[in-house]
Amino acid sequence: MDEFDSAIVNCLQGGFPLVERPFALVAAELGLAEEDLIARVRELLEARVLTRFGPMYQVERMGGAFSLAAMRVPPADFDRVAEIVNALPEVAHNYEREHEYNMWFVLATEQPEGIARAIARIERETGLPVLNLPKLHEYFVEFTLGATA
């Protein structure tokens, strides 16, 4: 990402305007044409610099649930397990970590009991136990990108 891409990400994540043409409004703030901003966001998504662009919902307020989960996956089996886990619509994010628990993912379900069902399915299909780490408290940590040297 260059400095301009960082400025785009910072501008978009701070609150997307709820107007008829939000990209036009943000583009004007950045000194871009609307179609150029849309193209740059699309390029960042296609290059997987950004993995998603969209709203963040507080699923609990809508009757659903979130949970962080982790697994100890044998390295030789990691790709197979990741494919199974990532195929579930309840899996929002999945990350490999250098840790005893080397696979971490977020589950999001429409009803709280959906978390247990998703975990049971993952355990059944992978043959591995899932460590469920439900959210007890919510914290907001803002992430902004600084200028690169």
Image (cartoon, grey):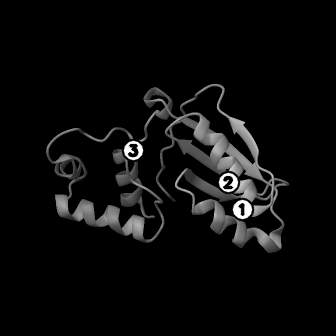
Q: Are marks 1 and 3 in contact (CB under 8 Å)?
A: no
- Rendered residue at 38%/43% (across/down): 55
Instruction: Judge from the rendering whether residue 138 lies leftward or rightward of residue 13; answer left or right.
Output: right
How far apart in space, not on screen, are marks 2 and 1 (Cα)? 6 Å
Q: Secondary structure at mark 1?
A: helix
Q: Of the residues shown, which amino acid type is indicated by label 3?
A: Gln
Residue identifier under label 1: 125
Tell us which disc is closer to us: 2 or 3.
2
Residue identifier under label 2: 121
- Rendered residue at 48%/49% (across/down): 146
Q: Of the residues shown, which amino acid type is indicated by label 1?
A: Glu
Q: Are marks 2 and 1 in contact (CB under 8 Å)?
A: yes
Tell us which disc is closer to us: 1 or 3.
1
Q: Residue 120 or 82: which is nearer the viewer?
A: 120
Q: Secondary structure at mark 3?
A: helix
Q: Position of residue 31 (x, y in %)?
A: 21, 54
Q: Residue 93 or 6: which is nearer the viewer?
A: 93
Residue identifier under label 3: 13
- 10 Å crowding of disc 3: few (<14), some (14-19), many (20+): some
Q: Quadrant of residue 57?
A: top left
Query: Which disc, if any, is residue 140?
Result: none
Mark positioned earlier in the residue sequence (2 or 3): 3
- Rendered residue at 69%/55% (across/down): 122
- 10 Å crowding of disc 2: few (<14), some (14-19), many (20+): some
